[in-house]
Amino acid sequence: ISARAVGSSVKLGYLRGGKLGNATVAIGDRAKTYTDLAGNNNDDETQTPEQADAGEGKLGIKVDVLPPSVANKAGVKQGVVVTSIRTASFADEINLQKGEIIVEINRKPVTDLATYRGIVAGLKSGDDVVFVVRAPLGQGGGNSYVGGTLP
């Protein structure tokens, strides 16, 4: 599927209940699908550069919408998932991990990308920052706390 272009379709065979079946499925953009499912239809083009880059610039991380299926498996109802961490950044220094689900920052719930960006936009150098995170799937349950002081 990864070799197919977004917007194309592919015929898939499957086995269900001992019977063979076929289905034609459309190849879609996963990020857009997850954003639409979460009800966050804001295009990146409508955000100011400060909103789009606040987490990357201040914290050294990129986050994305938490897919409902991942939220269910992780046992959380809301949050954002860390998709990348810049080497030698604040997030790297405090050992935040790719794949972790951020559910709170400084006792403020992170419900979606908009609340995440709003919280991060209010952070400034010298602020203490504490994240409540859920470990990636398959790496143990429960929330963890990571934090430090922004440089």
Image: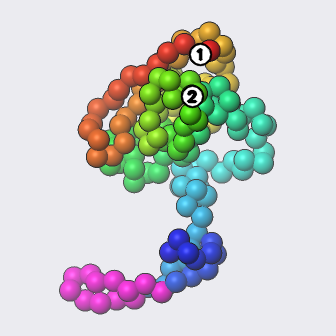
Rendering colour mode? rainbow
User: Where are the magenta residues, as a range?
Assistant: 11-22
Question: Residue 18 placed where, x, y %?
Answer: 20, 86
**Residue occupying image coordinates x 52% and y 83%:** 10
Looking at the image, residue 4 sits to the left or right of residue 125; the answer is left
What is the secondary structure assignment of the residue under circle 1? loop
Q: Is residue 67 visible?
A: yes
Viewer-proximal residue, 111 or 50? 50
Q: Residue furthest top?
A: 126
Q: Residue furthest front?
A: 88
Determine the main secondary structure of the stretch shown in magenta: strand
Q: Is residue 61 visible?
A: no
**Mark 1 = which residue?**
150
Question: Residue 148 placed where, x, y %?
Answer: 50, 15
**Residue occupying image coordinates x 41% and y 31%:** 133
| 141 versus 22 height, above or below | above
Viewer-proximal residue, 64 or 147? 147
Question: Residue 92 placed where, x, y %?
Answer: 51, 29
**Mark 2 = which residue?**
88
**Residue occupying image coordinates x 55% and y 61%:** 30
Viewer-proximal residue, 37 or 138? 138
Q: Which mark is residue 16?
A: none
Q: Quadrant of residue 27?
A: bottom right
Question: Residue 79 placed where, x, y %?
Answer: 48, 37
- Could you tell me the amino acid type at mark 2? Ala
